[in-house]
Amino acid sequence: MSVKAARRPPSKGGGAAPFQALFWRLPWLRAVLLLVPPLGWFVFVYLAALGLLLITAFWTIDPFTTQVVESWNLDNFRIILTDPTYWTIIGRTVLIAGLVTLTDAVLAFPFAYFMARVASRRVQTILFAAVLLPLWASYLARVYAWILILNHDGVLNWSLQKVGLPAANIGYTNVAMWLVFSYIWLPFMVIPVYTALERLPESLLEAAADLGARRWRTVRDVVLPLVLPGVVAGSIFTFSLTLGDYITPILIGGASSNFIGNVVYANIGIANNVPFAAALTMVPVAVMTVYLTVAQRLGAFEAL
Amino acid sequence: MSSAEGRKSFWRLACVSASAVVAITACGSSNTPTGSTQAPPPTANMKPPTSVGAGEGQLNLVLWDGYADKSWADPFTAATGCKLNLHPAGSSDEMVSLMKDGGGGQWDMVSASGDADLRLIYGGDVKPMNTDLIPDFKNFQAYFQSPPYNTIGGVHYGISLQWGPNTLLYSTKKFPTPPTSWSVIYDKANQGLVTVPDNPIQIADAALYLSKTQPSLGITDPYELTQKQFDATVALLKQQQPLIKHYWALATDEISLFQNGDVTVGAAWPYQTIQLQQNGGPFADTIPQEGATGWADTWMMATKAPHPNCAYKWVQWVSTAQVQAEQAISFGETPVNSKACAQMDALDAGSCHQYHADETGAAYFNTIKFWKTPLSTCDNGSQNCVPYDQWVSAWTTIKG
């Protein structure tokens, strides 16, 4: 007993002492107590909701009452896989999400490079504010601003007309969606790329220069490989945010601009066909699972 | 004048993420047998009250945002002592799910639109109402006293409120002679200049057009389509798809489409035309020779309404010519009370005629096919009609 007492960590007094002793005797208890709230949240709120979604996807609805009929079947998945409409919509969604990601990566890299390695402290702060400023404004306001730019009598056509060029009718097309998405999600790419670039040790660049590499060679062989995880991390945001969006297609899309989200929305909001919506939701879940697996291989999670 | 557009579609967007979660968890335990429309509605034999007693002090309403605007809700509370608790719904569907199980003993009334009414009635969620207790009922346009979307077998499952037609809106610059047929929105000459609402019920507009232009299909009711008629309608809409510039979701979107010259012709509500004309634009609307579809809202009482007296007092209140006119002006819709015309003109000169509130004859209302839920049971009792969930998936296919 006396030995144990001697080995007990010094108590700071007060009511915490018995707990401290307990934690000291049972080291795993502290870890469990620390992990229960976040893990509980994750399991019950997040995984349970996903699980429910998955289960619902195997049910159908009664067409008249729109009540869910709990009979197990694969009808929803069969429809999604056999109807070419859904393939078109899934393809369009993934393609535009990919294009947006690519565009944002190309735009963000030089910008983030300038911010991280060239700009003075003061300019850096200003640029940071400039990147984040649009996020303070409503998403809807920013999309509507683009509608004002791109529509038939909008700023773009007006400017083109002033310089004697023919009108570019890109309002209400998939091109308009690509532009708007690229604009809206750009900050989510700039920040991780900036972080990755800032971590880049100056010594490596100096070493490359000492070894005779020119600027482009250094960028290609030193900077890009080290920054790639940051780009992939940013692409997780731009890709998944585009993949799940359904408001921009409604507002600035053309006649055939449905995204997966729009079909999910129509099935829940209008038809009350939750099972079909749940089945369709599994598509982006699957796409993101593949995407995240690849991203993890590329080391994106260390850059987050 | 804030939100004719908000009411119909915008909030549908806003609440989707919330309702998705709610619906998925809420639907987990439901297991209701298939309904049949041949049987009378479950509440058909419930006897409505014959008099309105003292108010209960409370009234819980599920309604379109703004249907209990302060300007007429506050005087109501002051006059009757019924305090209003409002739950604005985002979509017809949200209304149906809130009203499940007869409103659950929580909700008293719902301001349902025609596309939800039959679901509520046959779901047993709403019960018959006594029209004798509504003094203004006799002033309603004859059509709206017993329209097919809220009156079945002579039993009134609600009291009509307001309505609006879906009109053909066009630019008078592009069409110096007014178009007389819906054919303009299916005409290749207008490629990329057409807009129609992003709503599966739009299939009925095409069916209505086909009922006149292809009589061999035998379409008599655009909401009751056999598979063959439905397929022909969907085929027409797929042909139309390349002509569409944008399927509009919000009334304001359509207004800016016309204003910015992106489109020159499309399907609209009177609200859009009036807004465009007030801004001085060269726009006009018409109800073409094939007729038009329309929407109409009804106050319906929950089967388990806890405050029925306040509910009747509320319907009495919103049926009066004054409140009908106020709501019509505030929303850009048309009152069902034929006496509301003078009050409308007093609030906004000329509005009565603009909104067709001065129409009296059956001839006008017969040209308008009001929204009702497409069911698998046709009017003749056969089960050959295409139900609404297939309308929704077909709409996805049409848009592609």
Image: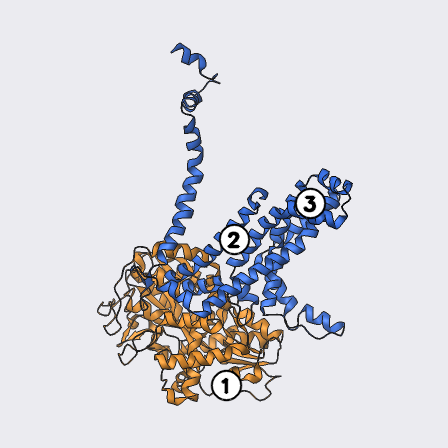
Chain colours: A blue, B orange
Secondary structure beneath label 3 = helix
Confirm whether residue A239 shows in the render.
yes
* Above or below for B142 versus B90: below
Residue B369, picture quadrant: bottom left
Tell me, for residue A222, which label it has, or none: 3
- A254 or A129: nearer the eye? A254
Q: Which mark is residue B183?
A: 1
Q: Where is residue A6 in the image (x, y as percent from the top left)?
A: 44, 12
Query: Which amino acid type is marked by label 2?
Result: Tyr
Does label 1 lie on the same chain as label 3?
Answer: no
Label 2 element class = helix
Give, as a three-letter code, the residue at label 1: Ser
Q: B342 left or right of A152? A: left
What chain letter is assigned to the residue under label 3?
A: A
Give the secondary structure at mark 1: helix
Few, some or many residues within 10 Å of mark 3 (<14, 14–19, 20+): some
Subunit ID for the residue under disc 1:
B
Give the spatial CA distance, label 3 vs label 1. 63 Å
Q: How crowded is mark 2: few (under 14 residues within 10 Å), some or many (20 or more)?
A: some
Q: Is residue B259 left or right of residue B216?
A: right
